[in-house]
Image: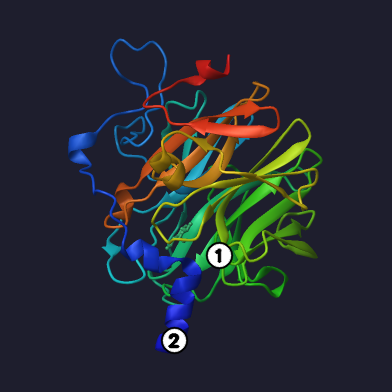
Amino acid sequence: MTRRSFLRAAAGLGLAAAVGCRRRATQLETDRADMGHDAGEPKGVFRPGEVWLDTDGRPIQAHGGGVLFDRGTYYWFGENKDAQTHSGFLRRADVVGVNCYSSTDLYTWKNEGLVLPAAADDPSHDLHPSRVVERPKVIYNERTGSYVMWMHIDTSDYQYARTGVAVAKSPTGPYEYRGSFQPNGADSRDMTVFKDDDGAAYLFHASEWNKTMYIARLSDEYLTVTGEYTRNFVGESREAPAVFKHDGRYYCITSGCTGWAPNPAQCAVSESAMGPWEPQGNPCVGSAEQVATTFHSQSTFVLPVHGRDGAFILMLDRWNPSNLGDSRYVWLPIEFQGERLNVRWRDSWDLSVFD
Ligand code: DGJ
């Protein structure tokens, strides 16, 4: 890669800003707090930004994640970044694989293990530790009875820009990796998948060097794309899409492109999953700093709370670029003001906010 193409790639990824990120590094050992096991607390509690422990007492490793609700249980899938963070211009942690945690109450999470492990012995494999595996999301396909995982696959220089697919017969895997491709021939970095009520599913992926968000219809089996796609937020450089549906409308929350450094979120609403999208502005409510940095975090998923109409949790990552494995989870409730979304900071909260 020439220096010019390297700089172009980095600019597309917003990495220059990441280099200057001044977020204070935090100590895992000195800042431990679990999500809901405190003595005297009869129910769980979410503590955004603190270390969240699983039921074995270990820090949860599920970054850039998403949650699937399946037969009474929530499954949280995310990147295991418990590996060395490589310093330098393009920071990344070696690929360990995709972790899964299960919960029935959203507060206590049982480690179901590495459901898609790195391919440590094959340097040419998409899942080799030297590569990039980010933002895994799983949806269930009723027709095939399969759990289908989509994820961002890349080389360490973020030039490969593909999406990968893996399949399992159980939510907790093991997932069989089926390979990667550029959907509809377009480069693909940050992404999510959204499954609609009618079973149609869509891949949202940052494309055109992160300048434009593509929304691609998935095939009936969710294993590939159909060729039908739209270009959205053209030239606006949005990434980290988190999509959900409420009262017949589709909402898409995104971040800007500044690498691991936080930036302002934006929300858009649509009558159709494939757009066109009407901008709603920044959903964050709070101090100027909180609004400008999305509470020092970046969107990854919107989690619908099962059985509670209108209850949605915005899942965000608070990245720690100097030690990506010590990045934190920021989950906050979404409040509706008519069609508009509001997200406010809370030091701690529980599901009663939705009562
Ligand atoms: C921002 C993305 O949202 C992350 O998933 C990751 O790709 C970083 N950029 C890399 O700089």
Query: Which of the colour schemes (rainbow, by chain, secondary structure, one colour) is used?
Result: rainbow
Residue 266 vs 91, above or below: the answer is: above
Give the x, y percent position of residue 58. Answer: 30, 37
Q: Quick one: SS at disc 1? A: loop
Tell me which amino acid carries mark 1: Arg
Give the x, y percent position of residue 9. Answer: 48, 76
Q: Is residue 146 visible?
A: no
Q: Quick one: SS at disc 2? A: helix
Residue drawn at 42 percent across, 33 percent down: 110
Residue 158 vs 118, above or below: the answer is: below
Give the x, y percent position of residue 99. Answer: 44, 47
Mark 2 surroundings within 10 Å by alpha-carbon count, few (fewer than 14), some (14 through 19), many (20 or more) = few
> Which quadrant of the view contains residue 93?
bottom left
First in residue order: circle 2 vs circle 1: 2
Residue located beneath label 2 in the image: 4
Q: Quadrant of the C terminus?
A: top right
Q: Quadrant of the N terminus?
A: bottom left
Q: Is residue 151 visible?
A: yes
Residue located beneath label 1 in the image: 189
324 relative position to 331: left or right: left
Q: Nearer the viewer, mark 2 or mark 1?
A: 2
Tell me which amino acid carries mark 2: Arg
Residue 16 vs 106, above or below: the answer is: below
331 relative position to 217: left or right: left
Residue drawn at 38 percent across, 63 percent down: 17
Residue drawn at 61 percent across, 34 percent down: 341
Q: Residue furthest front?
A: 288
Give the x, y percent position of residue 331. Answer: 46, 34
- Which is more toward the observer, 166 or 317? 317
